[in-house]
């Protein structure tokens, strides 16, 4: 992985391919910086069906795959930024999120946004140790 001023691009088939000019994530300076994950099925590139719980589950499965590809894990995440198109979904989002981050969750910001790519309800990005 990356050392010093180097950076290494991270890619895995366990998460959706980028839908624009960006990487799934980058390792630099002992940290992993993820791209935002939206609830796309990695096999088809299509939005998963269902509501906030199903979409959050897919997002966190994809995030877990890129964390693993970077040599990290949910337990090493230090910060997440979460985007919801409707803060009324906050409780449903939290119910799934809590299962992935357990008793020692990272710092987090959660904001409501007007719109996400492909009509997604949720997007999550993170910074973790590697």
Image (cartoon, rainbow, N blue to C red):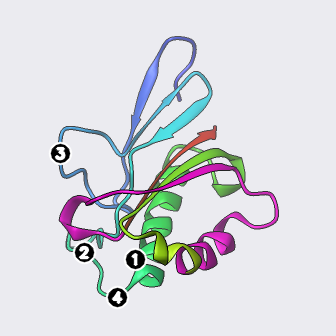
User: Looking at the image, is mark 4 or mark 1 earlier in the sequence?
Assistant: 4
The answer to whether 71 is drawn above or below residue 115 in the figure is: above
Q: What residue does disc 3 label?
A: 20
> How many marks on residues?
4
Distance between mark 1 and mark 3 Cα atoms: 20 Å
Label 2 neighbour load within 10 Å: few <14, some 14-19, many 20+: some
- Mark 4 — residue? 50
* Residue 28 circle label: none
Residue placed under numbered mark 2 in the picture: 47
Q: Where does the magenta region start and end?
A: 92-121
Q: Neighbour class for label 1 at 10 Å: few (<14), some, many (≥20)?
A: many
Give the alpha-carbon distance from disc 4 to disc 2, as whole Å. 9 Å
Q: Residue at x 53, y 74 (%)?
A: 93
Residue 55, how many percent across, how many down? 40, 76
Q: Which residue was labeled with disc 1?
A: 55
Q: Is residue 29 left or right of residue 123?
A: right
């Amino acid at each position: 992985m990356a050392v010093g001023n180097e950076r290494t691009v991270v890619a895995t088939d366990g998460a959706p391919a980028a839908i624009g000019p960006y990487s799934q994530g980058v390792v630099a300076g002992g940290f992993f910086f993820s791209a935002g994950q939206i609830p796309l099925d990695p096999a088809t590139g299509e939005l998963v069906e269902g509501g906030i719980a199903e979409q959050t589950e897919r997002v966190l499965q994809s995030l877990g795959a890129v964390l693993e590809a970077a040599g990290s894990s949910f337990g090493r995440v230090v910060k997440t930024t979460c985007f919801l198109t409707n803060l009324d979904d906050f409780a449903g989002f939290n119910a799934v999120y809590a299962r992935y981050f357990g008793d020692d969750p990272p710092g987090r910001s959660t904001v409501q946004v007007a719109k996400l790519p492909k009509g997604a309800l949720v997007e999550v990005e993170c910074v973790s140790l590697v």
